[in-house]
Image (cartoon, rainbow, N blue to C red):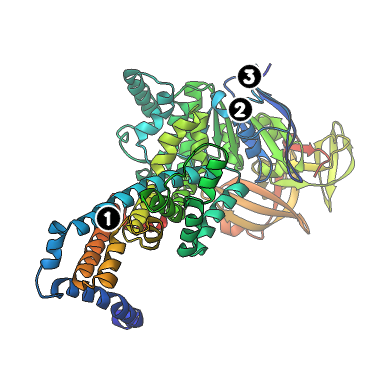
Amino acid sequence: MRLRYGSFLMPAAAVLLVFHLVPVAMVLGISFTEPHAGLQNYRALLTSGAAQNALATTFRIAVSTTLITVALGTVYALIAWKSRPAIGRLMINTVALTFWLSVLIRTVAWVAILRDNGILNGLLQAIGLIATPLPLLRNQTGVLIGMVHYMLPLAVLPVYNSLRAVPVQQLQAARSMSASGAYILRTVVLPQCTPGIVAACALVFMLSLGFFVTPAILGGGKVVMVAEYIRLQIEETVRWGLASMMATTLLVAVCVSMGLAARAVGLKRIFQGH
Amino acid sequence: MSFLEFKQVGKRYGDKQAVDNVSLGVGEGAFLTLLGPSGSGKTTLLTMLAGFTEPDQGRICIGGKDVTSLPPDRRGLGIVFQGYALFPHMTVFDNIAYSLRIRKMDKAALTRRVAEMIELVQLGGLERRRPTELSGGQQQRVALARALAFDPPVLLLDEPLSALDRLLREQLQDELKRLHRTIGKTFVFVTHDQDEALALSTDIAVLRDGHVEQFGSPHDLYSCPASRFVAGFLGVNNLLTPEIVGMDGDHAVCRIDQETWRAPARPDQAHTLAIRAEDIHISTERRDAANSVAVRVTQVDYHGDIYALDLEIAAGVVLRAKVPARGVAGARIENARVYANWRPEDSVWIGGRE
């Protein structure tokens, strides 16, 4: 009986095998065989300054993006949660709406806003706050701005979900015992939405590790993250072995962070947010 | 003057007058029950007392102080919520200590106070458990202990027993009564269950569509319900509308079909006569001393301690009687012709409203 029902899963398993597992296995294979068999590609992790730089930059930007995004996202979710229902819904829908815009369009829009003679610098100069344009593009600041903007919904939604799971009677109970708003937030609300916050961290961090379009455009070639490094090895220097080694390293990093987050709050709660 | 008082309190939600000009007051140490079906305004009244809802009109006073516009955190009332609203991420100890930590009580005093509360609600040994590891009844006790820990003058309880099964409910009902007697605070209790209300309260306000239908002691309400609604809600089973055919001394002579009996003289607006099921006794012979009406037993329900009998006086007119199970051969009296007997004083006329 079990086998017969299991057979319904065969098409899905076949798709997964052909389009996901086989390519991943091939990448793994290439990393050990190109240009010749051995561990020389992985040795680059210890010897190549460019590879180490790409990893360090990626890690630094991913951590910063995660901290900034989750902090902003938590505050945003808290405000939406405390507002009147109509306003709260509007705030959440607005954030969710940005999912529908292509990441490319959003990144190019940021170029228009952040460049030297762009909207932001123009505005700040016009009101006399700065004399020379702030360097907001082709550096880490630009990459962070673009990435935080892209990731914000991924932080807001899980935190908001976990906030909504806190029953209003608990807040009333705390109030009736004369707790202040800040005390209720600290002792009742935040402890109960820790899973949502951890979920947000995990999602944002894992996506940040492999992020490509935004760092490539807003970093302008100056900020090389892992994905950009891989593109360089494939398109410019044609070193597939190095490229697949880095891809494998990235995959391992994502799996490890997923594992850590799952140990902290449980895999199911990460994807449900509460 | 009353210790706790609603003065002409009203609250409207859209088109619905949730609470309509409610005035009532009780003394310190009372056990006030707000009794009514869902939508009667009892919960709105409680949330206004707690301070979570502001009334559109009227005043609410506690201990001679007007608290109408005071926020809930400055009213100092203990509240047991429906579903308890315990903090799931805290232990029993931390739940009970919550209000004491807000008041920055020093550690030794805090530990002592929590231990006192745990003793009061008999939860010894469960201090380190989380609410999810407790039964419904134990959770309810934690909620009580948490609400009482900071020694509030008034305890509000929002249907605290409704989530529990019948046996546990009766047991906790007893404990609630004991608790009320022990600590001597004013309790305000919301329920839709008339048995709970009658068993626990010193004062009951029966609410209907936002207004107080009747306010009084359980005994007053049960023996002299002011309306058919109150009578029905309190489980007074027999509401008859007999014809008055004359007077016999102080008594009115009532008639339905062929049967006549005596009742107290009827006030002007009253036309409904209420008789409690347990005041009716049955006999096989007509008795002279009390009212004695010929009836046919149409249904017999066995409840363990009693039989509930449906006694038909005339077509469509049925008396409900509760008779002790001992000494009645239940099955055999079905369809029997017997006599229903009750004293005229045990029947009461009910006012004009439906």
Viewer-closest of B192 and B338: B192
Q: Can residue B88 be seen here?
A: no
> The residue tagged with tag 1: helix, strand or loop?
helix
Q: Amino acid at mark 2?
A: Thr
Residue highlighted by disc 2: B202
Q: Amino acid at mark 3?
A: Phe
Residue highlighted by disc 1: A257
Q: Is residue B300 above or below residue A234?
A: above
Q: Amino acid at mark 1?
A: Ser
Q: Can residue B189 be seen here?
A: yes
Residue B3 — which label?
Answer: 3
Contact flag, marks 3 and 1 (Cβ < 8 Å): no
Horizontal and vertical percent for residue B281? 66, 44
Left or right of B321? Residue B270 is right
Q: Measure how far apart labels 3 and 1 are at the Cα level.
A: 60 Å
Viewer-closest of B330 and B241: B241
Horizontal and vertical percent for residue B145? 43, 30
